[in-house]
Amino acid sequence: MDRVTCLRCGQSYARAGIAERINAENPGLTEPALVRMAPDGDADVAEYESFVVPACTVCGGTLKPDVVFFGEFIPTEKFAEASSMVASSDAMVIAGSSLVVNSGIRLLEQARRRKLPIVIVNRGVTKGDGRATVKIDSGTTETLRAFAERLLP
């Protein structure tokens, strides 16, 4: 979530710099009457017709957060990297995912076949709950903070 990529030329930008451009090109964006932040980080924008989306400074192309959105395919090299991480891990923690997307289930299955402990942290039911060693029905922020406090010196 810290990078933004041009869909045309592949140029990569720091998300913070693009956020500054968005704020500069859209005065009043922080007014509560125009924007309401949702709990999942999404924003409900009241007046989006006049919203200015920054373009790539290299080619003028469309910018997109460097994440895989629901319904998009994970790049092959990224999935191979994730599989390699599972292969060299001692446990798997899945945080904040319903595991509806098949790539997430495939990684969980790789961990399960290796008989790794699997911890799922998510509010509500996930497709992997029956395969998890432990399911924590809670928010990711508070749970991962608690893990870090107990694990890190």
Image: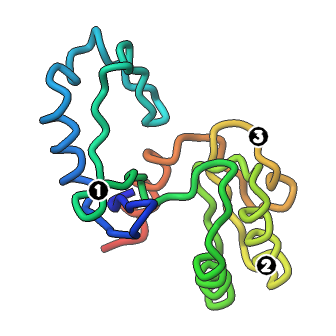
- Against 23, residue 74 (above or below) is below
- Helix, strand or loop status at disc 2: helix
In the image, is residue 93 above or below residue 1? below
Q: Please tell me in which quadrant of the rendered image residue 103 appears.
A: bottom right
> Foreground residue, 74 or 82?
74
Residue 122 image position (x, y, % from top left): 63, 45
**In this picture, residue 99 sits left or right of residue 131:** left
Instruction: Indicate the amino acid at tag 3.
Output: Val
Residue at image x 21%, y 16%?
A: 31
Nearest the viewer among 133 and 49 is 49
Relative placement, left or right, of 48 versus 118 is: left
Indicate whether 64 appears above or below 116. Answer: above
Q: Which label's residue is closer to the chain start, 1 or 3?
A: 1
Quadrant where the C terminus lies? bottom left
Question: Where is mark 2, residue-wise?
Answer: 110
- Labels 2, 1: front one: 1
Q: Which residue is mark 3?
A: 125
Question: Which image quarter holds the N terminus?
Answer: bottom left
| Nearest to viewer (mark 1 / mark 3) | 1
* Residue 47 picture quarter: top left
Q: CA distance from mark 2 to mark 1?
A: 38 Å
Q: Position of residue 15 (x, y in %)?
A: 28, 55
SS for tag 3? Answer: loop
The tag earlier along the polypeptide, 3 or 2, is 2
Q: Give the CA distance from mark 1 to mark 3.
A: 39 Å
